[in-house]
Image (spheres, grey):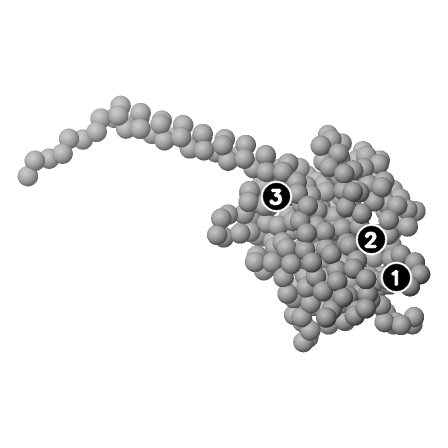
Amino acid sequence: MTALPRPSARRLARSGARAAVGMAGLGALGLAWGLTEAEARTVRTHTLRVLAPGTRTVRVLHLSDIHLLPRHRRRLDWLRGLAHLEPDLVVDTGDNISHAASIPLLLDALAPLLERPGVFVPGSNDYYTPKPANPLRYLRGPSELEASRSRLPTEELFSAFRAAGWADLTDRSADVVLGAGPDAVRVRAAGTDDPHLGLDRWSGFGPDDDGVPALRLGVTHAPYRRVLDAMTADGADLLLAGHTHGGQVCLPFVGALVTNCDLPRSQASGVSPWTAAGPTVPLEVSAGIGTAPSAPVRTFCRPEAVVLDLLPRA
């Protein structure tokens, strides 16, 4: 049998170099695509029949995970443009900022929306500044807060929200009346502090002293199962959360690789059913508007604001 000629060391070296150049090129292309998609913000709309019979249609605008830095001028311009959606209610599920200097910029961009009824809960990046980290750590599972992170002026942001009339749902509930006269709609909203930091204390929706509201809305930043279960068991009609970034790095036919909490990957974003103690209610998880500064890329998971058009149950 004739022996095949061995490739020379020089040919092997050239092949290895071409492979390395090819891999580097693919990596650069993937990074460019991820950076581009992170700026391809969209508005996603869902229609849900969750209101009490006889109630008029209610439009909810869900904002989450803006992660604003002062340099994010295009993000600010896009936020200003959301006012044209004319929501009846704005729901902010936290992680609004990544730097103290972002607060006045964010308040200016949200000014038209702050004139509308709203509710909010905090996320970890409303409390603490982000810290540079290896982006691959995100794929290991739920992240942990490092003790060396600096505090943000949280109260400066949230006091402005409250001064504008938005209800603070940090471990509490509030009634929000949308509109006036015979078409007014009363929403009982209740929320928690950030479950990702272990600060959540679910206090319930409270008694319906003024009659049954048209909607019981459960709001939290991070959709941990314990919180979603408690809200559902307590009579929620609809659950809203953020935090997951929709997985942020998703793959075709696979979807999200992680949720950064104990939520199933299949529910990392969008509307899906959540069942606890018998009842099943819609859970809407926003993929978020921004990204963590240490990982400013997205793949197959565009940033979003979410519009929920709520209709009465049949």
Task: Tell us which disc is closer to us: 2 or 3.
Answer: 2
Q: Secondary structure at mark 1?
A: helix
Q: Farthest residue in the bottom direction?
A: 278
Residue 74 position within the rendered picture, expressed as x and y whole percent measured from the top left: 71, 32
In the image, what residue type sits under mark 2? Answer: Asp
- Separation of disc 2 and disc 3 at Cα? 25 Å
What's the residue at 7%, 35% (across, down)? 2
User: Separation of disc 1 and disc 3 at Cα?
Assistant: 36 Å
Q: Earlier in the sequence, mark 2 or mark 3?
A: 2
Residue 298: % across, % down: 58, 41
Relative to residue 39, is residue 185 depicted above or below?
below
Determine crowd level at label 1: few under 14, some 14-19, many 20+ residues with C-alpha closer than 10 A: few
Label 1, on which residue? 183
Q: Is residue 253 left or right of residue 73?
A: left
Name the residue tied to disc 3.
302
Query: Residue 182 occupies which quadrant of the picture?
Result: bottom right
Location of the C terminus (image quadrant): bottom right
Q: Which residue is mark 2?
A: 88
Tag 2 secondary structure: loop
Q: Residue furthest left?
A: 1
Provide residue 148's location: percent of width, then percent of height.
72, 42
